[in-house]
Image (cartoon, grey):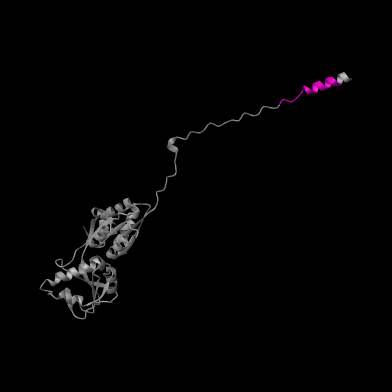
Amino acid sequence: MLMALFALLLSGCGQATTPAPSPTAVVAAPTTVPATEVDPSPTDAPAITLNVFAAASLTDAFQEIATAFEAANPGVTVVCNFAASQQLATQINEGAPADVFASANRKQMDVVIDGGMVRSEQVQNFAQNQLVLIVPKENPADLQTLADLAKPGLKLILADKAVPVGQYTLDFLTKASALPEYGATYAEAVLANVVSYEDDVRSVLVKVRLGEADAGVVYTTDAALAADALVQISIPEAINSIATYPIAPLTKSAAPEVAQAFVEFVRSAEGQAILNTYGFSSY
């Protein structure tokens, strides 16, 4: 019995189960994507804000120019600051963030050149303008000619002499006083009728349009904006003052290449066409 039991135990040990082999992992071969199918996401160009300081008389024209420039330069936003040129020149020299300066005369451009904010070789003229006398359509003072500006009791509004249009007006009066049809005292008599000197040309336009004065002197481009409410009395070319507008990028511009591109756009055929639409003459 012992021998039989011993044999049975030996046969049991000989039947140990051999574990099944682990399945071999199948590694997929890497898929090669043709180079032509790679489509990496493009890196967006940083947004740029271009600060343009421009004379008040350029308001309407430059708003349209800014829109056209933005359309041609995605990612660029043009922010315009409109005021009298001498105010803008002061702001620029005091450190206001600006990229482009468009002045209504060379005098104020020279102010920022002297302040080191513009290089003289980068200044370019881009438009011209002229003066015109405006009176309300009701014309209570019965103004018919330039000579009537010397009539006693007339209420006249002009821009301050510090404003380009104000100085141009004084130049016109000086020229007229040298002609016999006006007389040597013409300028003095006209200036005696001034009831207000304004900080910019648009203020002159608004006040005359509202009937706060019998007459005012503005640019032809400004007068055209209120043709429905005003009568224009032209100033002969011989005594008129031609306003020449210069423009330049600023030396401290945060985006000098874009600033130069804006200057070039203003002087381009498209920019000039917009300016012409608002009554400006090409340079």
Q: Is residue 239 above or below residue 273?
A: below
Magenta stretch: helix, strand or loop mostly: helix
Q: Position of residue 134 (x, y in %)?
A: 23, 72
For this orientation, the residue located farthest to the left is 180
Q: Is residue 241 above or below residue 267?
A: below
List x then y, in percent, for residue 257. 32, 50
**Residue 141 lies in the magenta stretch:** no
The residue depicted at 88 percent of the width and 20 percent of the height is 2
Quadrant in the picture for residue 115? bottom left
Q: Is residue 145 visible?
A: no
Q: Position of residue 204 (x, y in %)?
A: 27, 71
Query: Which image quarter holds the C terminus?
Result: bottom left
Q: Quadrant of residue 102?
A: bottom left
Q: Which residue ends up furthest to the right in the rendered image?
A: 1
Residue nearer the viewer, 125 or 88? 88
| Most foreground residue, 246 or 95 | 95
Q: Within the magenta stretch, is there residue 11?
A: yes
**In this orientation, does residue 190 appear?**
yes
Q: Is residue 259 left or right of residue 193?
A: right
- Total label count? 0
Q: Quadrant of residue 62?
A: bottom left
Report the span colored magenta. 5-18
User: Which residue reaches farthest bottom?
Assistant: 153
Q: Position of residue 71 (x, y in %)?
A: 35, 54
- Quadrant containing the N terminus in the rendered view: top right
